[in-house]
Image: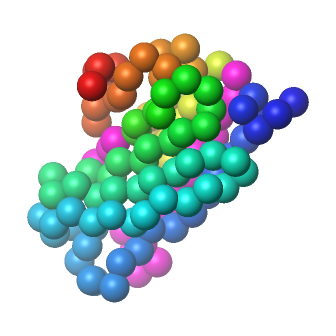
Amino acid sequence: MSALDEGTLRFWLQDQHPHWASDERGYNFGTKHPQGLVVEALKHPDKTVEIILGGLGGGPLRLREPIPRCDVRGLHVGITWSKAEVVLYLNGKACQTLSRSSSQEGTADPAGAPANG
């Protein structure tokens, strides 16, 4: 079984600005390369977080969800994937699940509906 078949990523997002999760600014948390993947994290002015996940085969997968209430540690992001699906967790709660087949076709809006773009 390879990293493309099944895996888990967990990380915290935090900024020096104390109200970053609830303000109307955009933030770019940069790009990391864990487990041979490419992960980029962005906070948009509409108070959503977008995780762009590349390296699972096909094009990048874009997951975007409203930011839940955060404590002083910031926002905890978890992503799990199997051959069948990718699941985004924010602060320990599953927020979005996409099938791996649909994830190759485009992006997902905050409600989780596929949208090409």
114 within the magenta span: no
| The N terminus lies in quadrant | top right
x and y percent of residue 44 in the render? 22, 55
x and y percent of residue 49 in the render? 33, 52
Q: How many marks are shown on the rendered structure?
A: 0
Q: Is residue 39 left or right of residue 69?
A: right
Residue, x 27% and y 83% (percent of image)? 17
Q: Residue furthest right?
A: 1
Residue, x 51% and y 67% (percent of image)? 12
Residue, x 36% and y 28% (percent of image)? 107
Taking depth in this image into account, of 72 and 40 the one nearest to the observer is 40
x and y percent of residue 102 in the render? 47, 16
In this picture, which residue range is highlighted in magenta?
Answer: 64-83
Q: Is residue 72 left or right of residue 99?
A: left
x and y percent of residue 52 in the render? 44, 44
Where, by quadrant of the figure, is residue 63 drawn? top left
Q: Is residue 67 visible?
A: no
Q: Is residue 105 above or below residue 41?
A: above
Taking depth in this image into account, of 106 and 66 the one nearest to the observer is 106
Taking depth in this image into account, of 58 and 91 the one nearest to the observer is 58
Where, by quadrant of the figure, is residue 13 drawn? bottom left
The color scheme shown is rainbow
